[in-house]
Image: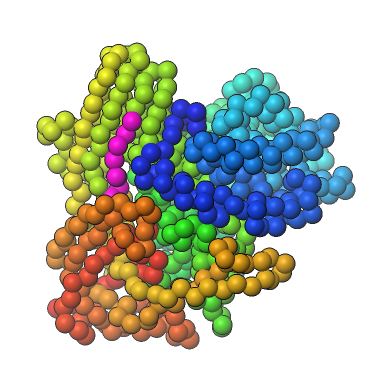
Amino acid sequence: MQTWHFYTTNELKPAGWMRRQLEIQAQGLCGNLDKVWRDVRDSAWIGGDADGWERVPYWLDGFIPMAYLLEDEDLIARAKKYVDAIIAQQREDGWICPCTDEEIPGYDKWAVHLISKVLVVYYECSRDERVPDIICRVMKNYYDLLSEGKWVLHDWGKYRWYEAFIALNFLYARKPEPWIRELAKMIRDQGTNFYDNVYLWEKPVNKWRWETHIVNIAMMLKFEAVSHELLGEAYQDQAEYFQNILEKFNGMPAGTFTGDECLGGLSPIRGTELCSVVEQMYAYEHLYAVTGDKKWAERLEVLAFNALPAANSDDMWCHQYDQISNQISCERFFGRPIFGTNADDSHRFGLEPNFGCCTANFGQGWPKFALSAFMHDGNTILNAVPVPCELDTEHAHIALETDYPFKNSFVYRVDAKKPFTLKVRVPSFAIALKVNGEACPEKEMLTFEFEAGQHEVRISFHVRPALMDRPYDLKTVKCGSLVFAAPFAYKKVMKEYTQNGVERKFPYCDYDYVGEKKDWNLGLYATHFEKREMDVDAIPFSSEKPPVVLLTDGALVEWELEDGYESVCAKLPKGRKAISEKRTLTLWPYGCAKLRMTEMPMIEE
C-alpha cells in the first residue's frame, strides 16, 4: 500500500481553468458570505449573536484554502480576522467553542471536531505558529472531559467521531504523547459503528435517521483512512465494503448517493445533498492518499467534474441543496416535495435552500480538490489528478498545462532542482496512450526519472464514449470521468425576499429554473457518438457554452409526469418505443446541464 502526502498552498497553485473556477468561487457566495449572511457575519464564533455551531467553521474550511491558493490579500486578511477572533475566546482550560459554562456538557462534540480540523487547515496554509498549541489545548480539554466522565459523545459528534482525527493526527505527528492515542481510542469507542447500520441502507426509510443521513455516511467513508494509524490497526479497505453497498442500493450516475436528506434508493428523481458531495470528495482525497489505489482518484474525478459544478450556478452565487439526475424543472413545490425528508425548496438554486449547512460548506470542494492534484513521498512526486496547476518544491518546479477533463492532452514543464522521480496516474479508461508522441503500452502509472535541469513531457490519450447501465434498465452516457446528459432550456425567475430574518437580495437571492416542460421525454438509440471539443469558456462548466459535447441519436418516448406533480418526470417511462422521428441529440457534460435527463431508456425497435 503506497501512502502519499498532500502539498500545501505554499507549494501548489492552481492554473488554467482550475484557477478560474476558484476565482469564480471567490467572487461568488463563498468569497462574500461574511458580508451578506448573518450566520457568518454576526456569528457567536466572533462575538456576535448568530449561529455558534457549525456554520463559521464550515465556511472557513473552504474559504481559508481558497484565499491562500489565490494569494488574495483581502481574502487572507478576512480569514485571519475570523481565526484571530476564535483564538481570542479560547479559555484557560482549552475550551474554544462559543457557549456558556452551563451549555458545555450538552454541547455537540461535532463542532469541536470541526473547528480543530479548520485550525489544522489554517496552520497548513498560514504557518501561524500559535495554532499547534491552540489545537493541543482544545484536544487536551476534550481528553479531560471524556476521561473524567463529564462528556459523552452524542448526536452529530457520535456519528462524525472520525473528524476529530484530522487534528489528532496533526498533533501526534508533531509530538507523539500517550494521551493523544488514549483520546483517539475513547472517541472511536464512543462513536458509531456503521457496520450496525448497513441493513437500513437497502431501501429508503423515508424518515429522518442518524444512521441513513447522507452527510454522515459521506464523511464516514474516510474513517479508517484517517484513524487506523493512530489506533495502531492494520488498514483493511473497509471503505470499499461500504462503497459497494451504497452504490448497489443508492448510487447515482454523477458518483454520489441519493440523500435528500437521508438515503433515497435508486430512483432518478430523488436528490442528493450538496454537503454530501464535498464531504465525499474529501473522503476520497484521503482514501487515495492513504492507499494509492486508483479507484479512489477516479471516483473523486467523477464527483468533482459532475456533481459539484451541477449544484452551483455559473457565478457560484447560488446553489441547490438537492440535485436530481432527471431534473426537468427546479421550482418550489406547492404540494408534497418529491424528496424523502427535505423541504419544498430544496432543489431551488438559492442562498440557503432547505438548510444553510450547504451554504457554508460547499466552498471546501474546489480548493481541496485543487490541493489533491500533486502528492509526494520522499523524492517522488505524484500527479494524482491532472488538472492545470503549478508545483514548486525543493525538488522541482512543475507546470502542468491541460484542459482535462474536457480534453485529454497534457504538457509537463519541469525545472528539476535536484534528481527526483515523477509519477503520473493513468486513468483506467485511457486508450491509445502516447508519451512524447510515441505509443505507450497502456498502464496504470507512468514513471519518469529526472536529473537536475529543464525537461518537458507530453502525454495524450483517447477516451471512448460508452453507455453505463443504470437501474430499471435505463442508461447513462459517460466519456472518461465526464457524465453526459440531455440539457433543456429554462427561464430563470429571481426571488428576492426576507424569511426568518434572512435577506435574499441580488446577487445572493433565490431562483426558480423553470423548464419548458416539453420534449424532455427522451430515449436513446446510441448506436454511435460524435465528440466535439470547443475552447474552455471563462466559466469552465458553463451552462451556455459547454467545452465538449457528444452527438448521438434518440427520439421521444412515452413518458409522463410523476403522478401528482407538474414539474417532475415520472420515475420510469411508460413505454420504450419511439413516438417521434429519430433526431440528433446533443449531450452536454452533466455539470453544465442544470436541467437535464441523465438516465434514459434504450429505444425498442
The magenta span reads 399-406
Q: Residue at x 39, y 70 (%)?
A: 595
Locate residue 177: give its quadrant: top right
Q: Residue at x 65, y 45 (%)?
A: 57
The question of residue 403 being in magenta is answered with yes
Residue 413, how many percent across, how many down? 28, 28
The answer to whether residue 471 of the structure is visible from this angle is no
Residue 168, relative to residue 38: is it above or below? above
Locate residue 603: give its quadrant: bottom left
| Colouring method of the image | rainbow
Nearer-the-camera pick, 251 or 564: 564
The answer to whether residue 600 of the structure is visible from this angle is yes
Residue 225, how many percent across, how many down? 50, 36
Instruction: Report how many numbered discs are placed on residues in the image.
Output: 0
Locate residue 402: give its quadrant: top left
Lateral position of residue 377 relative to residue 190, left or right: left
The question of residue 525 being in magenta is answered with no
Nearer-the-camera pick, 129 or 183: 129
Residue, far left: 438
Lateral position of residue 361 relative to residue 536, left or right: right
Nearer-the-camera pick, 550 or 263: 550
Lateral position of residue 87 relative to residue 308, left or right: right
Residue 147, how many percent across, how many down? 78, 34
Q: Residue at x 43, y 48 (%)?
A: 21
Residue 564, relative to residue 287: is it above or below? below
Residue 271, how many percent across, how many down? 47, 66
Q: Residue at x 29, y 45 (%)?
A: 403
Nearer-the-camera pick, 215 or 158: 215
